[in-house]
Amino acid sequence: MIAAGRASQRPADAKLLVLDRRGRITHAPRSRLVDYLRTGDVVVANDAAALPASLRGTHLDSGSEIEVRLAGRRSLALEHAPRFTAIVFGAGDFHQPTEHRPRPPLLSTGDRVALGPLTATIEATLDHPRLVTLRFDGEAATVWAGLARHGRPIQYAHVPEPLELWDVWTPIAAVPVAFEAPSASFALDWEMVRELRRRGIELATITLAAGISSTGDPMLDRRLPLDEPYRVPVVTARAIARARANGGRIVAVGTTVVRALEHASSEGTVRAGDGIADQRIDRDTRLGVVDVILSGTHEPETSHYNVLRAFASDPELGRASVVLETHGYRTHEFGDSVLIERRLTAGGDQPDVEKLEDNAMKLNHLNLTVTDVAKAHGFLQKHFGLRDMGRSNDTMAGLYDDDGFALVLMKAGRAAEVTYPQSFHIGFTQPSDEKVNEINRRLRDDGLDVPPPGRVHGAWGFYFNAPGGFVVEVACW
Amino acid sequence: MMNRHSNPHSHDDSTLDLDGVRVAITGGTSGLGLALVRELLGRGASVAFVARGDDRVARVERENPGAHGIVGDVARKEDIHAIALQILGNLGGLDVLVNNASSLGPVPLRLLADTECEDFELALATNLLGPFRLTRALLGALAASAREGRGAVVLDVSSDAAVNAYPQWGAYGASKAALRHLDAVWNEELGAEGIRWLSIDPGDMDTPLHALAVPDADRTTLKRPEQAARELADAIAAALPVGRPQATLAVTTAREEEAPS
């Protein structure tokens, strides 16, 4: 995937890939996230604010230039600001990829460092030449003032411009305890918060001191995420209990929220209060609380990606990764997002819905005669997300929609023309007028002759002649 | 809690105390701001204050034990997040923000026609953009406080110059009028999140700002800033929910392990 290199939290064209519990994939503008949530759901976000946790300075015992990245803490208690777990780099800065950064000088317990207006002692080395416990001199207030003056947000080479705190504080940032931004919350804005409220979807928060996502050192990266202290407010625990009792889903904004809520839960109940999340979330995790995750797009092999494996199967995630790649999604903290619903599991906790649907009678197959099988086949995949059934050829091709509806396209014998009666068409009903407009725009951009959307029989939509010789309706009723 | 009994309200009307309420005040080293620092400390609040001069900040901090002094200039965009970081770090969150720091614009006051653009810009930066930026930076914390039932208040110090057209008060008056309007819109937009915006004119007070504006004023006719501070503190207390839970973040029970020495 392309790295998002501009520090813009909510670019107008931010995209959202939705992978639902049956493995179906849909795309949406990320600003329409709320369309994929339901009344009664609870959205839980991490309200930690990112610290200016990158500090340049000098290792006084060797005189070497260093960069210290604060990376962990024992508790959320803010008066304990003086002591941190930290990762030390040699000279240079974020412009150089972390894996190419020079090592720091040999660090020993008792060594002194000067970081701008701050001074500190290395209290302990933590089984790795770059991982230490650092204790700042002075009171908490002195450390806050020093961090505010000298610290910079931790950043990586894919964003070339230096980041400011306002680039990395999410709109809901409340407690300055994170070492990197809980960036899934970049997707939220206050308009969205208002819309959630209007739709009866509650917004709740936890605070988790999100640690750093990458060190560039394979040994250290394997130890990520480090232990992270968190707090679940009483109101959040209650909101979750209410939603679960009423059949609402728990939607975690970001991997840090999953970690905190799953750590704080037992048998589906989330405990309010403080804790230290020390577990890993991966393919083997049986999620007890969280039903849906909103996350950035992550490359396989990262600890963030591993969290997604608790929600969807590897083949599903693999397919999603291919789609992200082919649809030009951007990755990293300022990139696009995915919304992944926890998969249905055999004997899982939501089998009833499946069963109901198995018994329901449904129209699920249509055979359409077309002038050009390949063209119609490609067109329906590209613009309406239908999936290739496989084994297609010039005279016959099959497609599935997200519900398993089978649409088969067949060549019209020897006739070059297909003539359907005038009123014949197939349709794709859309959830919103905007979606109709968006599809219309995309079709036009692709050079198709499509009339603009308008009012048709009380709906907002349009009809057009699709490649292959049949009429398609796109409308929101 | 210090000076509890020096406050006439605190022992006879407990609804007006501000026990454990986390308040940040800009322009906290003189005039109304300083009086507010003292008043709020007296009512049991946790207080952080912001001002430009390090010496004055250090002195006010020394004279008012428990208050957290922060050096910064709200008129400077670059200072806003550094200020917000220190407010949240020192208080562990925020329930009340008082945007009090103000600039008159040109001193001595001048007719609009004689006002330099740069002086007008300074009034706007201090009185309008500064409060907007700082409020925005702290909005997440205020909303968190509101969600937890502690309430959240932004008090923007206004002026009668925000509603009346006084000759020579154009830059100041226009900036304060805009701030007042901003408060009205904030309330419309985010009132549902439980955050309240108050725009209060404390009246003509005997403060350094007033002395700059009207050097030959008869000081005996002016309101004491202490009196105005009491009124503002009452307004804040009245806007917060009754029976609010205490904040827990700053003084959490989680214990940090002592490192081996």
Image (spheres, coloured by chain):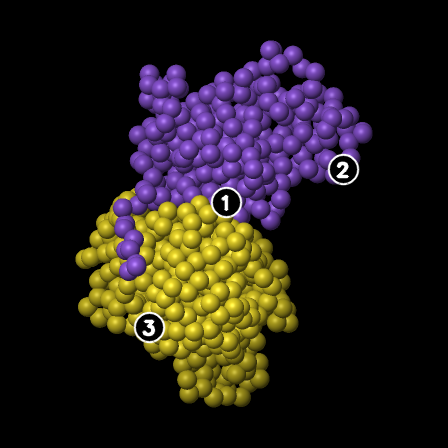
Chain colours: A yellow, B purple
Q: Residue at x 62, y 44 (%)?
A: B76
Please say if A213 is above or below B247.
below
Find residue B180 and report its horizontal and vertical position in percent: 58, 30
Same chain letter for marks 1 and 3: no
For disc 2, the chain is B
**x, y (%) of residue A268?**
22, 56
Give how far apart the Cα atoms at labels 1 and 3 are: 36 Å
Where is residue A158 drawn, in percent x and y? 55, 70
Asked whether the viewer can see residue A339, the reply is no
B104 is higher (above) or lower (below) than A431: above
A340 on left or right of B220: left
Q: Which amino acid does label 3 sit on?
A: Asp
Circles 1 and 3 in contact, beta carbons < 8 Å: no
Task: Write down the residue under mark 1.
Answer: B84
Tell me if residue A391 comes above or below residue A399 in the rendering. Answer: below
Callout 3: SS: loop
Q: Is disc 1 placed on a helix, strand or loop?
A: helix
Q: Camera-side residue: A398 or A437?
A: A437
- The x, y position of residue A37, in whole percent, is 39, 55
- How crowded pointer 1 is (Cα within 10 Å; few <14, some 14-19, many 20+) is rated as many
Q: Residue at point 54% right, 25% down?
A: B32
- The three-letter code of the residue at mark 2 reads Cys
In front: mark 1 or mark 2? 1
Disc number at residue A191? none
Q: Name the residue nearer the viewer: B231 or B212.
A: B212
Crowd rating for badge 3 (residues with CA inside 10 Å; few <14, some 14–19, many 20+)? few
Q: Which of A222 and B192 is in front in this view?
A: A222
Q: Which residue is drawn at 55% across and 78% down?
A: A468
Residue located beneath label 3 in the image: A127
Same chain letter for marks 3 and 2 = no
Q: In this view, does B246 lie to the left or right of B220?
A: left
Q: Name the residue under label 2.
A: B117
